[in-house]
Image: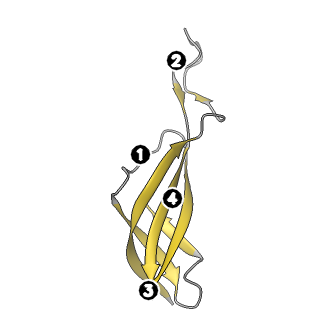
Amino acid sequence: MKKEIWGAVVSVKKQWWLKVNTKAFRTGPLDGAVFPHIAKVSYTVNGIEYVKRKWIGAGRPVPQVGSAVKVLYEEDAPAKAEVQF
């Protein structure tokens, strides 16, 4: 059975090594470039704190550090959770 809990965004890092170009013709190396991010989310279940990493695709909205996000987890295995932004 899945349960829902609120977690907090601990960190957000831009993945500079994967550039996605959005323009066919660019005037500079970063003109029209967007980058994916990796966010770390911390949540607590039964007094144990877990940290989950979530890949955020290029061009998607990125949450701010400290913001609350929804975490869905299995009651039997809280370490295997799904983070929803």
**66 in relation to 13, above or below:** below
Whether residue 66 appears in this view of the structure is: yes
* Residue under pointer 2: 31
Residue at the image point whose x is 55% and y is 36% from the top? 35
Name the mark nearer the viewer: 2 or 4: 4
Of residue 28 and residue 43, the one placed in the foreground of this image is 43
Q: Say which amino acid is labelled 1.
A: Pro
Name the mark nearer the viewer: 4 or 1: 4
Of residue 45 and residue 47, the one placed in the foreground of this image is 47
Q: Which residue lies furthest to the top in this view?
A: 27
Name the mark nearer the viewer: 3 or 2: 3
Whole-percent x and y of residue 46?
Answer: 45, 89
**Residues at marks 1 and 3, CA–CA distance in whole angstroms:** 31 Å
* Residue under pointer 3: 47
Residue at the image point whose x is 52% and y is 74% from the top? 50
Q: Which of marks 4 and 1 is nearer the N terminus?
A: 4
* Residue under pointer 1: 61
Whole-percent x and y of residue 5?
Answer: 39, 78
